[in-house]
Image (cartoon, helix red, strand yellow):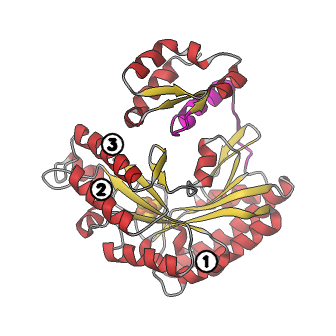
Amino acid sequence: MLLYIHVPFCRRRCRYCAFASLPLEGAAGHREISAYLATLLGEMTLWGERLGRARVETLFFGGGTPSLLPPEALAGILERARSVFALEAAAEITLEANPESALAPGWLYGLRKTGVNRLSLGVQSLEDDVLRMLGRAHSAREAAQACDLARDAGIANLSLDFMWGLPGQGSGQSQMQWLRQLRQAVALQPDHISAYGLTLEEGTPLAEACADGRLTLPLEREQASQYLAGADFLESQGFMQYEISNFARMGFACRHNLGYWEGREYLGLGPSATSTLAGRRWTNPADPAAWRKAVRSGSPDAGAEELDLPTRLRELLLLRLRLNKGLRLQEWKALTGRSFLKDYASLIFPLQQNGLAATRRGAFRLTRSGMLVSDTILAHFFARLK
Ligand code: SF4
């Protein structure tokens, strides 16, 4: 099983972000954290008992900003996880961090001692004017320092997040600027790079600035060339693409996220975390008070939905076609009793003819050009889902 722990706090809201995160300020912030930790530990114990010390292969602290938690709090969470679940000795334990909070004196050393063995740093850009435009709290220099400090602290598995397709004044980010970012990213010697295309979320300050013309997004064809050229560059530097937005040196693909895309079972703890276990799915309330009430009730999964066959098929397509290795034809056959290639012959043929998809070694996959337009391709598959 994969275990996800959602940490809902952020120091402040980034200008492109629409996540439900809680601002942390002063004494009220400390009280929020204490209440969060107490409920989280209770939720973990509840599930440990209900699932009979289930085996946990990967644990992921995501957010929000998990790096706002002090190492002692993270150590306490991991101690509870080890006592109520069978956390594997070789478990991948990831924590998402923002560079500025990772620079707090002793934080990274403390983190390493807790057993966290993979750090995912939200760098996003190594240009200060871009970081300001995105409303990030760190500078390019701080991001580079956080990488160095993480290595000094003994973090052997380091991932960096970057964003492409960014807006700018006059015109948006160019391919040249994006490749310059990636060159600087590679110079920091990470093991893994996530490269996300910006999605403008309605109601965010960045979306408003683009809507009223203060900022301009790169043209669609410019964005496409950024994606393709960026992926080529990363592969030329030894970072193999394994998912639409993820690239890793050999042996450093994120086991936790791969688990989601491969359809493994996962338990999510914390406000707004989703779980999928034994064919059932539920999502915790995002509101902390409602989440605490749900945990206190002893049945946070009371509103779970059963995953029916159409939903499972939809997810099979949605998740496997994100991956370079694609959808195993056998997996489709096992669920439906039918042949995927026959079911979708009229769609697959033109996709393959146009270099957007390929069938190889018993799997159907999107090519890199296909991944670029995966939303449109998936919509065609979904429309024909039988
Ligand atoms: S740190 Fe992450 S979750 Fe928090 S506001 Fe920024 S992008 Fe959103």
- Say which amino acid is labelled 2: Pro
Q: Residues within 10 Å of mark 3 (few under 14, many from 20)?
A: some
Q: Do we see residue 149 in this rendering?
A: yes
Q: Position of residue 274 (x, y in %)?
A: 63, 49
| Label 3 element class | helix
Q: Quadrant of ligand 1?
A: bottom left
Magenta residue span: 301-326
- Say which amino acid is labelled 3: Leu
Please tell me the numbered disc located at residue 242.
Answer: none
**Residue 312 part of the magenta-drawn span:** yes
Q: Residues within 10 Å of mark 2 (few under 14, many from 20)?
A: some
Nearer the N terminus, badge 1 or badge 3?
Answer: 1
Which residue is depicted at the point 45% across and 81% down? Answer: 103
Nearer the N terminus, badge 1 or badge 2?
Answer: 1
- Say which amino acid is labelled 1: Arg
Give whichever of 174, 29 is nearer the camera: 174
Q: Which residue position holds label 2?
A: 205
Give the distance between the C-alpha atoms of the residues marked 2 and 3, in whole angstroms: 28 Å
Q: Which residue position holds label 1?
A: 112
**Residue 265 part of the magenta-drawn span:** no
| Label 1 element class | helix
Res 367 → quadrant: top left
